[in-house]
Amino acid sequence: MADRVSYANNDGMNYDVDVLIVGAGPTGLALAAQLSGYGTSFRIIDRRQGPSTQSRALAVQPRTLEALRPFGISAAMAGRGTPAHQLKLHLPEETVSVGLFDVGIEDSAHQQLLFLPQSETEQILLSYLASRGVRVERGAELLELERLVPDDPFAGMEARVQRQDRGIDRIRARYIVGADGAESTVRRRAGMDFRGSGYADTFVLADLEVDGADPGAVHAYPTEDGFMVLFPLGRPASWRMISLKERGDNSAVTLESLQAVADKFSGGGLVLHDPKWISSFRLSHQMAEFFQSGSVFLAGDAAHVHSPIGGQGMNTGIQDALNLGWKLALGARGLATDELIDSYDAERRPVARGIVGFTDRLFKLATSRSGLKKLPRTKLLPALAPSIAANERLRSRAFRTMSQLGIHYRGSTMTESALNRRPALLTSGPRPGDRLPDAVVHYQEKERRLQDLVAAPGFHLLLTGPGWPEDTPQQIHAALAGLGRLLTVQRLVVGSKLTPSGPGVIEDVSGLAFERLGLSPRRPEVLVIRPDGYIGYRSSGTDITGAVAYLERLIGAGARSSLQRA
């Protein structure tokens, strides 16, 4: 990688790489993309000879598109994906149309549910990595993991890797990340429990053409026998069909059997043809007891698996990676305390637990076939669907959850609110631990998005409102010299298109940024934005000591002398 920065190992250990990523699906590739931005030394291996060619996971949520914006690939994903703006709920007596993501996510640049085959998501990430000089090492299978210091689980690991081209490779890494799927070798070799159970039902799915389904919408067919859903896919076929097999049916899935399923749920109004991919699979809901064991971390399906209902799986894995990546990158530089590294498990495991529970409830609602358990689907849903479709507040809350924009880390020790701020019940706007909302702003006389202006690697401080001394940015940089280029200080002010802004000044011409952040143009505040786009710290007034102390708590007292140019 060009312009690489290296950092002395404070513990005296010698590593081949800082991070070894095992698994090159969307989770592992997203982690590699983030590490490359920090100049972190890493290798990414995968036992497969090539990237996925199947559509597999296909829903891309708005928060995932936001999180991938720093790599400049969200536009490519949106351009190649198929958006769905409507859900058509085909009930026995009527069809109810529900707008998708039309309310509740106005503070995002990505206000749509996007369907994109996993194979194309991987291709876009691989192209980005190739532009950074990164390649995936294919045909490389992890065999064993061994601690570099037997009595110290945090001192790094040696991985023994079977290479199809040159035998056994030994890689000494400060950190190991298992992004190698539900059957994770990393998880097994690290001795980490995977708890949960499987579902009795078998899913059938296919990518194919469907005559009789209106394009651009998700079509759902709930009945007493379960459900069928059609998702607008675009490529490699126009539709993804997903449903359930009859229990006890062990026969192969064919186009004819899929047509019979479609007839049963749609009443014969659909014609299926030209399948590109047909499969069946069993599901489980499982989660690792912990996402970290010493120097070993789990992300994506290696850490949690659940029903695909709700389109949360791949999105959760990518966001696991982007919560973890910056922490490991700073740790490799000697710029992260043990508490910051350990916060990955503390922050992401509750999120995963919530999603596993949420999707489990949705799955049971959609599939239960016993008398009482199927009543919500067969009786309540038809009766309440029109009212739900018309209830903007209810849909707003649902879309906020599905889009993952509502995920927060408010209980994390890595977030903090100054004592001089009014209690949360008396203030508006996001709290520490919440995602930074987006808005259109002006910077250097150009229209930009706020999230893009705080997307560079590292921490960003926003000084808002009036009264800031001109030398405040210099004071902050001097106090946190060890962060170097990983610290950016900018002003956010209410501005005008007619008045050009100075260097480092972001102008909120519309007032939306101030409104969404709960700011007053008359009251100064300081916000620390973490590298993953979440607010880490908020304080009222122009005193910077609290923000500096917060960052020192994350990066450690010895960080100021650790930086060296290779």
Image (tube, rainbow, N blue to C red):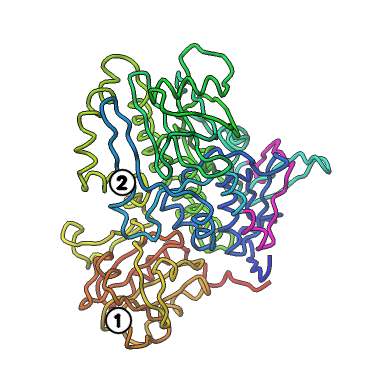
Q: Can you name the residue that lies furthest to the right here?
A: 166
- Residue 431 position, x and y percent, is 28, 59
Residue 49 placement, left or right of 487: right
State which region is magenta: 126-150
Q: Compare residues 548 and 351 and report the one nearer the observer.
A: 351
- Residue 479 position, x and y percent, is 43, 77
Residue marked by disc 1? 495
Q: Does the segment drawn in magenta span residue 140?
A: yes
Query: Residue 42 appears in which quarter of the rendering?
Result: bottom right
Q: 428 above or below 112?
A: below
Q: Residue at x 58, y 57 (%)?
A: 33
- Residue 375 position, x and y percent, is 25, 21
Q: Dot 1: what SS?
A: loop
Query: Residue 165 appears in which quarter of the rendering?
Result: top right
Q: Can you name the residue that lies furthest to the left here?
A: 426
Residue 492 placement, left or right of 268: left
Q: 370 above or below 300?
A: above
Residue marked by disc 2? 99
Q: Amino acid at mark 1?
A: Gly
Q: Does the segment drawn in magenta span residue 82?
A: no
Q: 382 above or below 346?
A: above
Q: Can you name the residue that lies furthest to the top here?
A: 248
Q: CA distance from mark 2 to mark 1?
A: 35 Å
Q: Badge 2 local density, few (<14 within 10 Å), some, or many (20+)?
A: some
Nearer to us of marks 2 and 1 is 2
Q: Amino acid at mark 2?
A: Gly
Which one is earlier in the sequence, the residue at label 2 or at label 1? 2
